[in-house]
Structure formats: structure tokens, C-alpha cells
Image (cartoon, grey):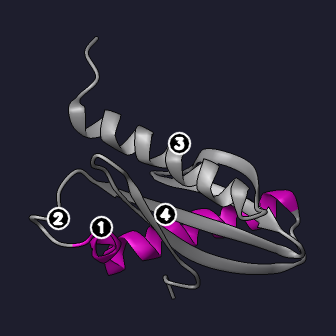
Amino acid sequence: MKTSRHLEIGRHGEQLAAAFLEKKGYQVLVRNYRASYTEIDLIVKRDNWVIFVEVKTRSSTAFGEPEQAVSALKARHIFRAAEHYIFSTNWQGHVRFDVVAVKLGFEPTIDHFEDAIN
């Protein structure tokens, strides 16, 4: 079975985002967490915070910046999946929702937007 280019780009962006966050001192807890019909790209931890991260990767900005691609509907799905994770792990600390935007090119650029989904 052939993997589509779109999925390859997304997977590569998630790998870059995870490495980027680890360098910033975050611990990657889960990649591609699924609850019902939603997937959270990365769940990371730092101090007393669990952060749910949506990674948006683009090979071109012809259709806008990657961070602008998180719709209100997508945000609601992420919140629902995060709630599932919080209850299933009995997390008692702080929670945040971030976006990591990855622009691929000769030299990929990565931007981390903290508390970007609310």
C-alpha cells in the first residue's frame, strides 16, 4: 500500500516538531493519541503541565501559514480527545493546547505557539 505524499509530509513534520520540543525541555509522552475519531499529534509534558500539541506542516505557504489551519471544529475535537486522556490518566496538573507550525524547505522552520487553541 502506498502512503500518500500528504501523510508523509505530516509524519515528517510531527517528527521534526517532537525533536524541536524535546530540545526545548519537553518530554514526549504520546505520539498520535487517538480517542474516538480524533487524533492528537503529540502529548508532551514539562514540569506540572501536560500540553496537547497540534502539528501543522506545509511544504508551501501558498494556501496560508500552517498555524492558521486549526479550525474551530478541529479544536473541539482536540478538546474532547484531551478530556479523554486527562480522565484516563487521572492527570491532576495544568493543561495547555499548543500549535507547532512546520514549514518544510531547504532549511525547515518551526514555530511554537503556546496556548494557541482555546
Quarter placement of the N terminus: top left
**Judging from the image, what secondary structure is the residue with disc 1 in?**
helix
Task: Say which amino acid is labelled 3.
Answer: Gln
Q: Earlier in the sequence, mark 2 or mark 4?
A: 4
Query: Residue at the location (42% across, 47% down)?
Result: 13
The image shows residue 100 at horizontal and vertical percentages of: 48, 66
Q: Residue tagged by mark 1?
A: 66
Query: Residue at the location (36% across, 44% down)?
Result: 10
**Judging from the image, what secondary structure is the residue with disc 2 in?**
loop
Q: Nearer the viewer, residue 75 or 21?
A: 21
Around disc 3, counting alpha carbons within 10 Å, would you say few (fewer than 14), some (14 to 19), or many (20 or more)?
few
* Magenta stretch: includes residue 43: no
The image shows residue 18 at horizontal and vertical percentages of: 61, 50
Report whether 45 appears left or right of 107.
Answer: right
Report whether 32 appears left or right of 51.
Answer: left
Task: Say which amino acid is labelled 1.
Answer: Pro
Task: Say which amino acid is labelled 2.
Answer: Thr
Q: Which residues are magenta?
A: 65-89
Task: Say which amino acid is labelled 4.
Answer: Glu
Q: Earlier in the sequence, mark 1 or mark 4?
A: 4
Q: Nearer the viewer, residue 95 or 6?
A: 6
Q: CA distance from mark 3 to mark 2?
A: 20 Å
Q: Please say if the residues under marks 2 and 1 sit with CB atoms less than 8 Å apart.
A: yes
Q: Residue 61's mark?
A: 2
Around disc 1, counting alpha carbons within 10 Å, would you say few (fewer than 14), some (14 to 19), or many (20 or more)?
many
**Judging from the image, what secondary structure is the residue with disc 4 in?**
strand
Q: CA distance from mark 2 to mark 1?
A: 7 Å
Q: CA distance from mark 4 to mark 3?
A: 12 Å
Q: Nearer the viewer, residue 33 or 49?
A: 49
Report whether 66 appears left or right of 76.
Answer: left
